[in-house]
Image (spheres, rainbow, N blue to C red):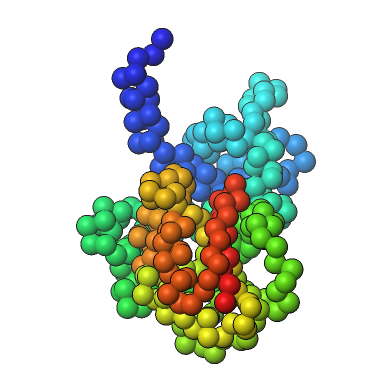
Amino acid sequence: MCSQGDEGYRLLKEYANGFMVSQVLFAACELGVFELLAGAPEPLDSAAVSARLGASPRGTELLLDACVSLKLLQADVSGGKAVYANTELASTYLVRGSPRSQRDMLMYTGRTTYVCWGHLAEAVREGRNQYLKAFGIPSEELFSAIYRSEGERLQFMQGLQDMWRLEGARVLAAFDLSPFRVICDLGGDFFKDPLPEADLYILARVLHDWTDAKCSHLLGRLYQACRTGGGILVIESLLDADGRGPLTTVLYSLNMLVQTEGRERTPAQYCALLGPAGFRDVRCRRTGGTYDAVLARK
C-alpha cells in the first residue's frame, strides 16, 4: 500500500512533468503526425512516418511511442515491426477536418500561450502580461499586435469556432433566449465603434480579457445601446465563490495574467460589474462544461 508521502511524490512528479505531456501533443500536431496517419491506407511504421514527415528516425520513433503512452496513437506489430495508427481520440479531436477537431486551438496554444507561460513567474512579480519578454511586443501595442501574423489571428479565430461547436449548445441552452428577437454577438473594437441596437448582446470570452474599469466602460456602452427589456449574455468560465476552483478556470485566470490584462471572475464579481452599469436580474448558470452563462436584463 502506498503511503500518503508516496502519493504526494507521485502528484509532484505528475505536476512537474505536465509540460512534457503538452509538448508531445503540440509537437505531434505541429509535425502533422495525426493527419499523416489519418490519410494513410494502413498503419505505418516509424521509418515510413519519419520519411514522409522529413523528420529524424530516432526522434520520430520516440515521439510516436510517447503518443502511444498518451493514448493518442495505437501500436501493433506487423512483420516484426511496430506500426502506428490514430486512436479514436486523435481521429476525433486532432485531425484537421474532423467535425470535432480542436487542432487549431492546440496549435495556437503550443505556439503562443505556451511561450507566454514560460514567463509566469515574471507575470506574477510584475502583475502584467508577458508578450514583451516572449515576443518583443511592448504592452502599449499588445492589442493591435497580439497576433504575430494574419495567419495566427485566423488560426485563433478558427480555434474559437472549433471550441464553440463543442461548448456552444449547452451554453445557449442555459437560459430561454426566445424573447430576444435581435441578437448581436459582440466583436471588433467595441470600446470605440458605434454599437448596433439589439435586444440581446452576447459577450463570449470578452470580459475576461479586460480590467474591471474597461469592463465597466464597455458594459455602460452596451446598456445605453440595448433596447428596453433587452439584455446581455456573458459567456465565461466561472470561478467558484472563493476563487480557488475549478482548477481549469483557475488556470485560465493565470492565462489571462500572462496573455492579457484581465482575469476570470466569480458570479459575485460579474454581478458587481453588471449592476452599476444598470443591468438587473443578474442570473448565473453553470453548464457542466468549460464555459458558463450569465444573463442580465435592462
> Where the N terminus falls, by quadrant?
top left
Q: Is residue 57 visible?
A: no
Residue 89 in the image: above or below residue 35: above
Q: Is residue 204 left or right of residue 20?
A: right
Image spot of residue 288 (x, y percent): 60, 47
Question: Which image quadrant is residue 284 in?
Answer: bottom right
Question: Which image quadrant is residue 113 in?
Answer: bottom left
User: Residue farthest to the top?
Assistant: 1
User: Residue farthest to the left?
Assistant: 125
Image spot of residue 112 (x, y percent): 44, 60
Q: Is residue 178 left or right of residue 262?
A: right
User: Residue farthest to the bottom?
Assistant: 194
Q: Nearer the viewer, residue 121 or 294?
A: 294
Identified at 62% across, 41% down, the residue is 49
Q: Is residue 267 visible?
A: yes
Q: Nearer the viewer, residue 108 or 30?
A: 108
Identified at 63% across, 78% down, the residue is 229
Residue 195 in the image: above or below residue 233: below
Image spot of residue 271 (x, y percent): 46, 64
> Where the C terminus falls, by quadrant?
bottom right
Residue 80 in the image: above or below residue 192: above
User: Residue farthest to the right?
Assistant: 41
Residue 273 in the image: above or below residue 16: below
Identified at 54% across, 33% down, the residue is 70
Identified at 38% across, 36% down, the residue is 15
Image spot of residue 215 (x, y percent): 43, 73
Q: Nearer the viewer, residue 10 or 212?
A: 212
